[in-house]
Structures are given as C-alpha cells and as structure tokens.
Amino acid sequence: MSGFRATGRPARIAVVGAGIAGLSCARALVELGVRVRVFERESCPGGRVATRRIEALCFDHGVQYFTTQDLRFEAVVHQWHADGIVAPWRGRTMVLAGRGQGEQVAAAPRFVGVPTMEAVAVYLARGLDLRLGNAVAQLRRQAAGWTLHDDSGAALDEAGFDRVVLAMPSASALPLLADLSTLAERVATVAWDPCWAAMLSLSRPSGIDFDAAFVSDDPILGWIARESSKPSRAPLRGAAESWVLHAHPTWSRAYLNMEEADASRWMQRAFAARRGGPLSPSARGPTHGGRPDVSRAWFLDGSLVTDELPFSGRPAIKSPYR
C-alpha cells in the first residue's frame, strides 16, 4: 500500500465511472483503507449493466448475462446469489448458423441480476461515496495532486486527489488524458465495436422455442433474447413477451448514424423473418419520446491495462460475433 499514501495521511483517490469496473475498483481501494470518491455522469450507477425502464417494462439492453470462469469471481458470485442479487438464467440458448437450423449451446451457468441487471451495480455501490450526475470534463494536475472539473470549469472537489482512476470507455477517457499522461497514446489504440440495441414487446406469444440465441447467419442481428424469460422479472403489463435485440457489429457500424426509428424497423423485420412470420399487429418497440426505443452502445474489442497499479489484472474480452 506504500504507493497509495500521501505524506502523513491516507491517500484520496477519485474513480471516474460507476460501471462494474469503477465500483469494483472503488470497493477494493476502500477495503485497503483508501479514501475514495466515485464520480458518475449518469443518474444511476451501472454503465452497461444499467436497465432501461419504459412505461411498465424493464429491459437489460446492455450486458445480457455473465459467467464465472475464475475461482475468485465464482466465490463472489456465490455470495451475490446468497444475498439475492443474482440468479442463474436457465433459458434455452442456441447458436443459429443456418436458416431454420440451430445448435443448443452447452449449459454453462449464466447469471443475471435480479430483478434487473442494474441490481449488481446498486449492490456494489452500497456504502461508497458516490456522486451521481457529476460529469468530469477535465482533469488538472496540481502541485499537490489532481483536481476534477465539470464542463464549466468548476471544480467538483476543491480538496483534490492524490490519484485518479478512469473506469470509462477509452473514447471518453482520451480527452481527459490528452497532454497529461503517456497512457493517452495507449488509450487511442483501443478499438470498440458499435451495437444497436432494440427493445421489443409482443402482445401475443412469439412461438419461438428458445429463450436466447447467438445469430451468425443474419446480416443484421447478432443476438436475441427473451427478456421475460430471465428470473424474477416483473410481470409484464399489456404484453405477452419482451425481447432484446442486438444488431451485429458490422451492421451497427455501417448504419451507426441511421435514424433510431429506421434502425428499430430493420431490426424488427429481421426478428420477424427469424421467427418465420410477421409479428402480431400490436407488436411494438416500447416508445420513449414518441420513438421506438433503441440505443447505441460500444463494446470493447481489445484491452488496455496499466501496470502502474498493484491491483491491475488483464481482462478477458470475448465477443459472440467472432
């Protein structure tokens, strides 16, 4: 811990980003006796495990599930399960590799947050000094450390910090690092894949005999999941099923600037074709602001690790589309 203490007092560290990485980092530092403050621009923690609420429906439109491939993480998830934060998702998952043909994926334990994925982030955030709705627009290096500023130039914490951890997408981190750290060059090399996500409710059962699928034979869709098949989801009101559709990164990149309503329409058509027939007349994408609800997200296709911090570890980056 010698590298984390300023002279005569515990170090103060700012963590920018309250996704799973930022919250986990903050908790680990707090357990080591460090004073930590977490800054998050959104109104809730979670990042890509955040939940979209539209009318009476909830959708996990980002991260769909997670698995345990490390004994240390397995112990953590076991405790989360005991605490009622996560549960196994035993939905039938397929790989669709040909029209009308599919292969069931081996039943590796898949976990989801309950009642939504957001529950994991809320659980990790408990007890932390978390400042929501605080967007960090600039870092300034001072003689005594670092100060964080909003887009008006106002300091978000006058006392400043000894260290700053950026737990955020590289595209957001790069402007903060420019001219301040050699990490900027490494951050600039990290590539991201875009992903259109659409949220769909059906007034009648779809008749699809699986709950999720990796789609490898469709030019538009890359993943489809029956959201309502996940455990402990709230009863649907006015709908028989709810689905999350992820477009393939190649299609998403080609049509990243498409109007949201058009992207939703194309994805619904692809889903209907996969289903083998038109959707029910009242099938709809839940609306928000009068538009079918879709979102644009960025998924990491690469990794960036700094060896300057003793708790660094190399992340395992996987993609269902490769």
Image (spheres, rainbow, N blue to C red):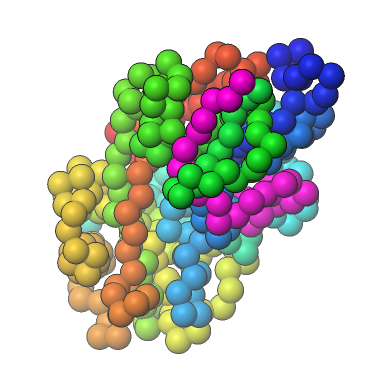
Taking the magenta stretch, the answer to whether it contains residue 124 is yes
286 vs 150, left or right, is left
Count numbered badges in the picture: 0
Q: Position of residue 25 (x, y in %)?
A: 65, 33
Q: Along the line of sight, which residue is nearer the eye, 94 or 116?
A: 116
Quadrant holding the C terminus: top left
- Residue at the spot 43% in from the left edge and 64% down from the top edge: 226
Q: Residue furthest right?
A: 8
Residue 268, picture quadrant: bottom left
Residue 4, picture quadrant: top right
| 117 lies above or below 199 | above
For residue 19, say whether it is visible: no
- Residue at the spot 49% in from the left edge and 75% down from the top edge: 57
190 vs 219, left or right, is right
161 vs 187, left or right, is right
Q: Position of residue 257 (x, y in %)?
A: 18, 54
Q: Position of residue 75 (x, y in %)?
A: 73, 35
For residue 231, say whether it is visible: yes
Q: Position of residue 26 (x, y in %)?
A: 68, 36
Quadrant holding the N terminus: top right
Q: Which residues are magenta?
A: 117-143
- Residue at the spot 20% in from the left edge and 45% down from the top edge: 253
| 289 lies above or below 48 | below
Taking the magenta stretch, the answer to whether it contains residue 121 is yes
Residue 177, picture quadrant: top left
- Residue at the spot 73% in from the left edge and 42% down from the top edge: 78
| 50 lies above or below 214 | below
166 vs 267, left or right, is right
Q: Along the line of sight, which residue is nearer the eye, 254 or 108?
A: 254
